Each structure stands twice: as C-alpha cells, then as structure tokens.
Amino acid sequence: MSEANSSFKAVSHVIFDMDGLLLDTERLYTESFQQICSRFGRVYTWALKSKVMGKKALDAAEVIRAELELPMTAEELLQESRDIQERIFPDAQLLPGVERLILHLKKHRVPVAVATSSAGVTFELKTSRHKEFFSLFDHVVLGDDPECLVFEDAPLGVKAALAAQMQVVMIPDPNLDRAQTTEASLTLGSMEEFRPELFGLPAFG
C-alpha cells in the first residue's frame, strides 16, 4: 500500500463514489462500447477510455466516434451504448472489500454516503441486485438530483464544487485576494448575509 502521508486526520463521516469503486460498472461501460466497436472492427482501448473519463456523455461519444472513425453520429453511438447498458447494468457486482468496509462503518455508527453522476433510473439499474446493501447508506446523491449548494471559504474548494456541477456560496477570509473569489456563484462577507430564498430554500422567518 502506498501512503503519501503517514499522518492522517481522523474523519467523522465517509462519502463513496459508486462507479468503479463500489460497483464494477466501469467494466460494463467498456463492454457496451466494445460491443459497438467490434461491429466495425475497432477496439475500445484503455488509452481511448482514459481520454473520455469524466466527460459528459455526448462529448465522450463524440471523442470515441472521431478517434475510431465510426460510421455513426455521436448521438447514435450514445443511444446504442445506453440500450446495451440497460441490459447489462443489472449484472453489476460489488467490488472486493466493499461490503465488509460499509458493514464495519455502520456497525460503529460512522455516517456513510454515496455520490454518483448516474441519474435515478440508471442508479436503479446498477443497484437492482444490491438493494439491501445500498439501503445501508445514510444518504445517496444522484446526478439528476436538484442542484446541490455548497458553502466554501477556499478557492480550491470552489473549483471542486463547480467541477461537480454544484452551485457554491463563497465566504472568503477578508484577507483573501478578491481576484480569487470571482468563480463562485455568490460571494458574501459573512454567513449573516446569506438569503436562503435566492436558491429556492425556505426564507428566514
């Protein structure tokens, strides 16, 4: 095991990514695209997959189509891959060590959550054989959930929230260069200035 830093801080709760970490769905994504590519004598390689990881679905399909010169549009490739995935996602298996760790954390009352970019319908397909396991999580955040709101004081935290397609309210240290606060959805001087109704939340009484 590689440890970049041997002095770790204690944590009070744990958030897990789902695809490729809890479930072996990355293998199934690869399988779905390879089924299509094989029809045209092409190979969906790891090198190509690494180029599209993290991209939006249609953008990823366009890269795959262009790189492999597939005789179809990106939209057709995406739809066909989704048709295949609907059939094979229910076969997703838990990865080694996952159940043991989650059960251990629950036994010791450590809150656990799962976060995924999958929409609700896709989440249901992927987890259909593991309902009992996923019921152990205290919270599940899905890709098509209503927008999440994050509060941050650090520029890197703001960037991470935006990368996760979340809105972010920044309350920076007064000494921070204001040029580093421009990316936030909203920047405030203190929490006292926050108006919940701006984000569709109940207003203060």
Image (spheres, rainbow, N blue to C red):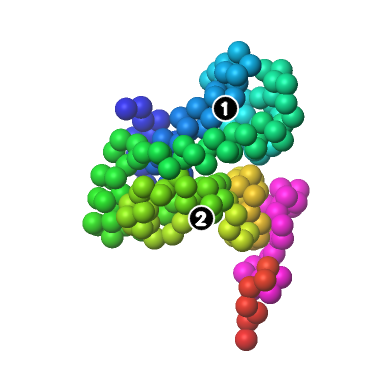
Towards the viewer: 113 or 29:
29
Specify which label sits upstream in the sequence, 1 or 2. Answer: 1
Point 70% across, 54% down: residue: 184
Residue 30 position within the rendered picture, expressed as x and y whole percent measured from the top left: 52, 27
Q: Is residue 115 above or below residue 26?
A: below
Task: Write down the residue under mark 2.
Answer: 141
Highlighted range, magenta: 176-198
Towards the viewer: 112 or 204:
112
Q: Quadrant of residue 100?
A: top left
Q: Residues within 10 Å of mark 1 (few under 14, many from 20)?
A: many
Where, quadrant-wise, is the N terminus in this rendering? top left
80 part of magenta stretch: no
Residue kind at label 2, given as amino acid type: Val
Q: Is residue 109 left or right of residue 31?
A: left
Q: Is residue 58 above or below residue 169?
A: above
Q: Is residue 30 left or right of residue 76?
A: left
Q: Quadrant of residue 22?
A: top left
Towards the viewer: 58 or 160:
58
Residue kind at label 1, given as amino acid type: Phe
- The secondary element bearing badge 2 is classed as strand
Task: Write down the residue under mark 1.
Answer: 33
As measured in the structure, the alpha-carbon distance from the residue carrying label 1 to the one carrying label 2 is 26 Å
Residue 203 position within the rendered picture, expressed as x and y whole percent measured from the top left: 65, 79
Task: Between label 1 and label 2, give the one nearer the viewer.
Answer: 1
Residue 8 position within the rendered picture, expressed as x and y whole percent measured from the top left: 36, 42
Q: How many marks?
A: 2
- The secondary element bearing badge 1 is classed as helix
Point 71% across, 17% down: residue: 69
